[in-house]
Amino acid sequence: MSDPKSAEGAVLALNAGSSSLKYQLLHPDTEDVLADGIAERIGEHDSSITHEQGGESVTEVRALPDHRAAVESAMAFFADRGTDLATVGLRAVGHRVVHGGRIFHQPTLVTTEVISEIRRISTLAPLHNPANLIGIEAVRALLPEVPSVAVFDTAFFHSLPDAAATYAIDRGVASMHAIRRYGFHGTSHEFVSGQVAEFLGRPVGEVNQIVLHLGNGASASAIAGGRPVDTSMGMTPLEGLVMGTRSGDIDPGIVMHLNRVAKLGVDQIDTLLNKQSGLKGLCGENDFRTITEKIEAGDAGARKAYDVYIHRLRRYIGAYMIELGRVDAITFTAGVGENAAGVRADALANLQNYGIVIDDERNALRGRYARRISADESTIDVLVVPTNEELAIARQSAEVVAQL
Ligand code: ADP
């Protein structure tokens, strides 16, 4: 960016994962992206950071022991390119926070009390909220004059109907320990469902839809007239679809069995189900590109992993069609959903009796733009819509700051 003034009024959107930190500097109104970057493998021996600004991309392998170091490295990249984020006139820093518990239903201005509350509910998301908090605190220390806004992954789903949000366990225990289905990827499901309505040229309040967010983490949602009626992730992001490294739904009895018979402790089971399961657990790979190559080379393990993935996905699609009654659109988004045409075709194969027909040529097109992949005779529109969580975070943060 040659003119640092062009960052005036921009928002820095930060998305801290358990071992990564993605960031983007953008104007929420014009959607103009000034810079973005990603720090990966934070806390591991081969951590690296990539920063892209003004058409130039730099990747450096460097020690990033924690998320604070990642935030500091990102800030240093900006400073080296003449963008001092402390003085450039940022409107806000928007932080993705994974778990909002029972408290946070809206994007929220970060204060000391808000930080304490997010820390208090970290027991609900021990892999995520602590990383989010370190990001928030590092930014507040480095940019004390810029308002920080927390945007919660659970917020969109806070209005899930009781029947969908409730686990059939002892009511007293559930209430005491805040056990219910919260849902995640809410920023993406809300953003994409809005884009779908725009694409169809209808008010979101009129559209019944299923959104399939298939990335490394994956979740499905059923949305009736803009309000979520069900979603596949639960109290934690572990429930639901088969994911890159997470198991998704399993019989809870397996956890007891692993403890009693395999003698695994709770942290080992946590790691097994969150990091060593899903596609990776089934075939050793969690990247769909590699899995597709392996299937083409005749690898039986990769084939089985793929089949389990598709089976689970179809199960959720079927359930949500019944829950919604009338479905106007089914939409694929995120890394796998936007790119893997085979997954889209297999997820919705042989459903012509239910009004779903994929057009193979449309489905084979590539690109980061919203498009219809269903055939003209399909009564349900099947779409691919790129998600943009950073833009959604930036917009929501700007709205909060505008009300100050
Ligand atoms: P997350 O934000 O959950 O880390 P993304 O939405 O970026 O994940 O999705 C990442 C996943 O998308 C990768 O692990 C990979 O499996 C899949 N993916 C990305 N590009 C392609 C592609 N061209 N074909 C198939 N899968 C892809």
Image (cartoon, helix red, strand yellow):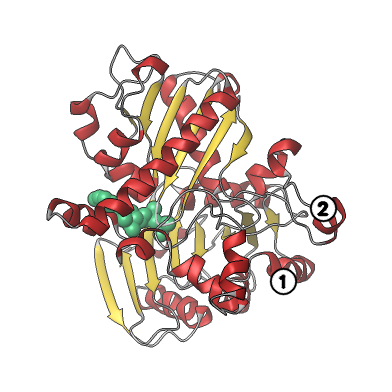
Q: Nearer the viewer, mark 2 or mark 1?
A: 2
To which quarter of the image does residue 344 belong?
top left
Under mark 1, the amino acid is: Arg
The residue tagged with tag 1: helix, strand or loop? helix
Quarter residue 284 falls in: bottom left
Residue at x 45%, y 55% (from the top left corner): 217
Residue at the right extreme of this rendering: 172
Mark 2 residue crowding within 10 angstroms, few (<14) / some (14–19) / many (20+): few
Looking at the rendering, in which quadrant would you find the N terminus? Answer: bottom left
Residue identifier under label 2: 170
The span from disc 2 to disc 1 (Cα, nearest Å) is 26 Å
Q: Position of residue 70 (x, y in %)?
A: 46, 78
Residue 14 at x, y percent in the picture: 51, 63
Q: Is residue 294 above or below residue 76?
A: above
Q: Residue at x 20, y 34 (%)?
A: 365
In-image side of 401 versus 168 (left or right)? left
Answer yes or no: is residue 387 visible. Answer: no
Q: Give the residue drawn at x 22%, y 59%.
A: 290
Q: Quadrant of ligand 1?
A: bottom left
- Circle 1 Cα neighbour tier, 10 Å, few/some/many (<14 / 14–19 / ≥20): some
Across and down, in percent, residue 90 comes to 54, 61
Q: Which residue, given by chain and number where applicable, does mark 1 sit on?
A: 119
Left or right placement of residue 67 versus residue 101 in this view:
left
Q: From this viewpoint, which residue is outermost toward the front? A: 261
* Rendering coords of residue 114 (x, y %): 75, 65
